[in-house]
Image (cartoon, rainbow, N blue to C red):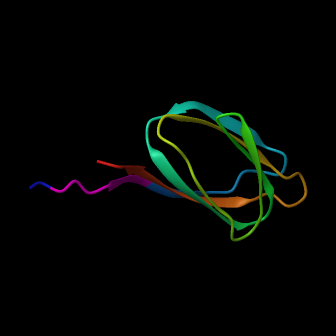
Amino acid sequence: MRLACPIIVYARFAQPAGGQRFQFACVKSRMLLWCRWGRGKVRINGHEFLVQPGDFLLTPWAHAIAYDADARDPFCLAGIHLIPH
């Protein structure tokens, strides 16, 4: 029997400027997203999440994602992209 293990294909930190917005139409991975500090909004496949320090989000495969950093207290995010198998 062959076991498939997920692999990490990309990992990074990002801290956008206050009020900065950016998006990706189709991300072909699952991502574990962590808010290290600050605040903002993350929209995943049209569902909006308010994030603050210590929050984690796990995205589905082939997701659309948009980030809106808070104007006064922009978030710092860490993300790990996984290919499940």
Q: Position of residue 74 (x, y in %)?
A: 80, 57
Residue at the front extreme of this rendering: 1
Q: In the displayed structure, would residue 10 be above or below residue 36?
A: above
Occupied quadrant, residue 66: top right
Q: Position of residue 21 (x, y in %)?
A: 76, 39
Q: In the displayed structure, would residue 45 be above or below residue 55?
A: above
The residue sitting at 90% across, 58% down in the picture is 72
**Position of the N terminus by quadrant:** bottom left
The residue sitting at 76% across, 43% down in the picture is 48
Q: Is residue 78 left or right of residue 85?
A: right
Residue at the top extreme of this rendering: 25
Q: How many marks?
A: 0
Occupied quadrant, residue 73: bottom right
Magenta span has 6?
yes
Q: In the displayed structure, would residue 71 be above or below residue 52?
A: above
Residue at the right extreme of this rendering: 72
Of the pair 2 and 49, the residue shown nearer to us:
2
The residue sitting at 44% across, 36% down in the picture is 28
Residue at the left extreme of this rendering: 1
Q: Is residue 82 left or right of residue 38?
A: left
Q: Position of residue 62 (x, y in %)?
A: 48, 34
Q: Is residue 30 left or right of residue 1?
A: right
Residue segment shown in magenta: 3-10
Magenta span has 77?
no
